[in-house]
Image (cartoon, rainbow, N blue to C red):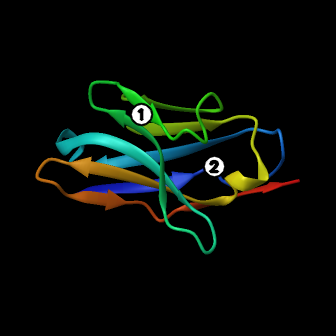
Amino acid sequence: QVQLVESGGGLVQAGGSLRLSCSVSGSIFSINAMNWYRQAPGKQRELVATITSGGSTNYADSVKGRFTISRDNTKNTVYLQMNSLKPEDTAVYYCNAMVTGGGSMWGQGTQVTVSS
């Protein structure tokens, strides 16, 4: 089992920055990729960014050039640096781990609110 705990959300003005953290514990060796998703009110959950076990990254078109996913293996933590935030980035952000065997684990989510 993998446990995920997000932190770092909050209220920020448009144009500002936030860094989300996802602390990972448990069967870390089983993780193939880490993702950040977000879900805005009334909308479907969408994939924002991915980092694989090999270090490859991928981003949704809506956040390319503004968001950066990274990891610190010494701290078992994955980050999402969010710059140039827009009101449309307002959502609950979830950390997700894809594990060997096809399983998927989720954190509890952290709220990000961007005011105009």
The residue sitting at 20% across, 58% down in the picture is: 103
**Hey, what amino acid is under mark 1?**
Lys
Task: Say whether residue 10 is visible.
Answer: no
The residue sitting at 58% across, 32% down in the picture is: 64
Q: Which mark is residue 8?
A: 2
Rendering quarter of residue 93: bottom right
Which image quarter holds the N terminus? bottom left
Foreground of the two, 72 or 97? 97
- In the image, residue 59 lies at what x, y percent? 49, 36
The residue sitting at 77% across, 47% down in the picture is: 86
Please, what secondary structure does the residue beneath circle 1 have? loop
Left or right of 52 on screen, residue 94:
right
Left or right of 82 on screen, residue 76:
left
The residue sitting at 57% across, 52% down in the picture is: 7
Foreground of the two, 20 or 69? 69
Q: Is residue 38 above or below residue 48?
A: below
Q: Is residue 39 above or below residue 24?
A: below
Q: Which mark is residue 25?
A: none
Distance between mark 1 and mark 2 Cα atoms: 16 Å
Q: Nearer the viewer, mark 1 or mark 2?
A: 2
- Outermost residue on the front side: it is 61
Q: Identify the mark nearer the N-term, 1 or 2.
A: 2
* Residue pointed to by mark 1: 75
**Hey, what amino acid is under mark 2?**
Gly
Report crowding for label 2: few under 14, some 14 to 19, many 20 or more residues within 10 A (C-alpha). some
Left or right of 58 on screen, residue 93:
right
- In the image, residue 85 lies at what x, y percent? 75, 42
- In the image, residue 70 lies at what x, y percent? 47, 30
- Outermost residue on the left side: it is 101
- In the image, residue 65 lies at what x, y percent? 62, 27
Q: Is residue 1 above or below residue 43?
A: above
Please, what secondary structure does the residue beneath circle 2 have? loop
